[in-house]
Image (cartoon, helix red, strand yellow):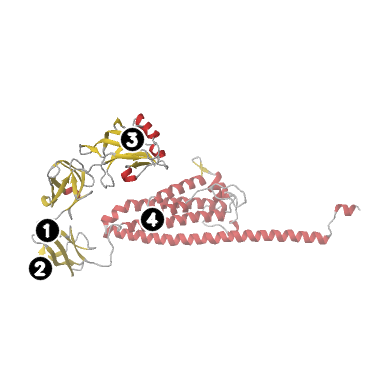
Amino acid sequence: MGGAKNCPETPRQKMISMMYLVLTAMLALNVSAQILNGYALVNDSMKKNITISDGKLENLSNEFDGLLHSDSIKANKVKPRVDSVIVQSDEFCKYISELEKKIITTIMGDPNATELDESMNGDLNVASQIGLVDKVDGKTNAAILKEKMESYREFMATIDTAKAQSIRSTFSTDPLSSTEKGGKPRAWESGVFEDMPAIATLTVLNKIKNDVKITESEALAYLIGSMDAGDFRVNKIQALAIPNSSYIMRGGKYSAQIILAATDSTKKPVITINGTPLEKDRYEFVCNSVGTKKYAGSMVLTKKNGETQTYNFESEYTVGEPTATVSADLMNVLYAGFKNPISVSVPGVAANSIEISPSNIKSSSRTATGWLVVPAKVGTPCNISVSAKVDGKTQHIATKTFRVKKLPDPLAMIEYTNAQGIKSRYRGNSFDKAIAKPLLITARRIVAELNDSDLDVKYKVLEFSLNYFDSMGNTLIEKASGDQLNEKQLKIFREMTNRKTVYISNTKALGQDGLTRTLPPVEVKIK
């Protein structure tokens, strides 16, 4: 009974348990060794990449040294930035190398050691001690590494702004996500040093160094390439004649620039037009006859080896009679006393170089889109003379004649509010037939407006009368000053019955032309 209670193990069971523990330990050791070997392989790969990057950087440095001699003006403009990139990268890599050496020599116990023995790859103490415990000027080595990495990151982001986001991502020091479900993010410093096998920390440090080398080479390539950013790169050379304008008025000057596309501005080609050498690269003359004109020429360019290459060109231009386009924005007439908007254009001439001189006007003024012209007398034509400044000289272009008419008379209308709450107009029984009483009693004023017209003319009602009838059929008149219906007039509207009629009469309205008009009566009939 006692043996069964204590569950003693037989020798065979003890042997099986011992073998399970040994196999489990061996399996764990095997996985750990595989992980450490994986880090070692990645670390060796990083070192090879660093060596390759060093070779690329040496080639870029030699290329830039050559440019300092062959194209010194452009190269010296970017040299300060090239030097800064090299210095910043070298200093950062030097610090990383010193940190790596400190970890290796401490683990190996040899100040001259440069590599870890394979058996030491799994050391979990030294990297943490050096990175997170040891301090320099009050800061841990991990904190110093983070500061240097952030400083380098922000500096390199200013070199090629198009890659700034990529650079900031490459050298990110943001907290690292936890590998455990629900775990909190780890500080970047802890992710690099805390409880990490030595080979893992060295691999991360070499990765940072490799990223620095790659970023440095990309920055140097960008700076070298930027030297020619302002140059045109083409695979075709073509001679061009570029005129200031292809449309010339008689008496005006034709002006064209003759250039060789993609040529170096420091090398002047020999230009010949119609057999005559051109002293400058600008071809200009006075045009005295109208029509389409053509000319041809050639450009001779001398190569570096002394050979010459000829490029032919031709161009044409049109000389026309002086003309102008003048249009009334409203109609083909102008209205006396009213600010008539006028648009004037001359082909090939800027609007601010055009002037007008109108006759029979009270005033004229320039606007953002043309002019406002106020004619003086009805029946007297308004002649608008157009002139333009061409090649520094004022030249008469054309004259346009407009008829001058009186502004049309408006109609008196009752303003009311419709069922949708919108202000509407009732023009009387002769236009709109009868009006519903519920709409009429919303009326508050009389307005004067043009009937179905494109003219935007404002009229002010000065006075009006309301004519209505008593029970004996006598006509009664209720007058009002201004445009507002008075209380008695409103009461008359409210008391009207079906088919009853009243009249709005003797309406006087003042127009924008300063004239007061008496408007036709309005027959108001209830449905």
How would you rate the neighbour count of disc 2 (Cα within 10 Å): few for under 14, some for 14-19, many for 20 or more?
A: few
For label 3, the SS is: strand
Q: Is residue 225 left or right of residue 405?
A: right
Spatial separation of the CA atoms under disc 3 and disc 2? 82 Å
Residue 165, position as x, y percentages in the image: 43, 52
- Quarter-of-image position of residue 271: bottom left
- Mark 3–mark 4 CB contact (< 8 Å): no
Q: Which residue is mark 4?
A: 219
Q: Closer to the N terminus: mark 1 or mark 3?
A: 1
The residue under the point 76% across, 59% down is 18
Residue 255 in view (yes/no): no
| Lower position in the chain sequence, tag 3 or tag 2 | 2
Circle nearer the N terminus (1, 2): 2
Q: Amino acid at mark 1?
A: Glu
Other-residue count near label 1 (Cα within 10 Å), few / some / many at <14 / 14–19 / ≥20: few
Q: Are there few (<14), some (14-19), or many (20+) residues within 10 Å of tag 4?
A: many
Q: Which mark is residue 275?
A: 2
Measured in 3D between alpha carbons, the distance from the residue under mark 1 to the one under mark 3, in whole angstroms, is 56 Å
**What residue did someone put label 3 on?**
445
- The amino acid type, in three-letter code, at marker 4 is Ala
Q: Nearer the viewer, mark 1 or mark 3?
A: 3
Q: Identify which amino acid the numbered label 2 is placed on.
A: Gly
Q: Earlier in the sequence, mark 3 or mark 4?
A: 4
Residue 265: x %, y % from top left: 21, 59
> In the displayed image of the protein, which residue is found farthest to the front?
472
- For the residues labelled 1 and 3, say whether their Cβ atoms are less than 8 Å apart: no
Q: Return the residue at label 1.
A: 321
Regarding mark 1 in the picture, which secondary structure is present there?
A: loop
How packed is label 3: few (under 14 Cα within 10 Å), some, or many (20 or more)? some
Distance from Cα at disc 3 to Cα at disc 4: 77 Å
Q: Is residue 320 above or below residue 94?
A: below
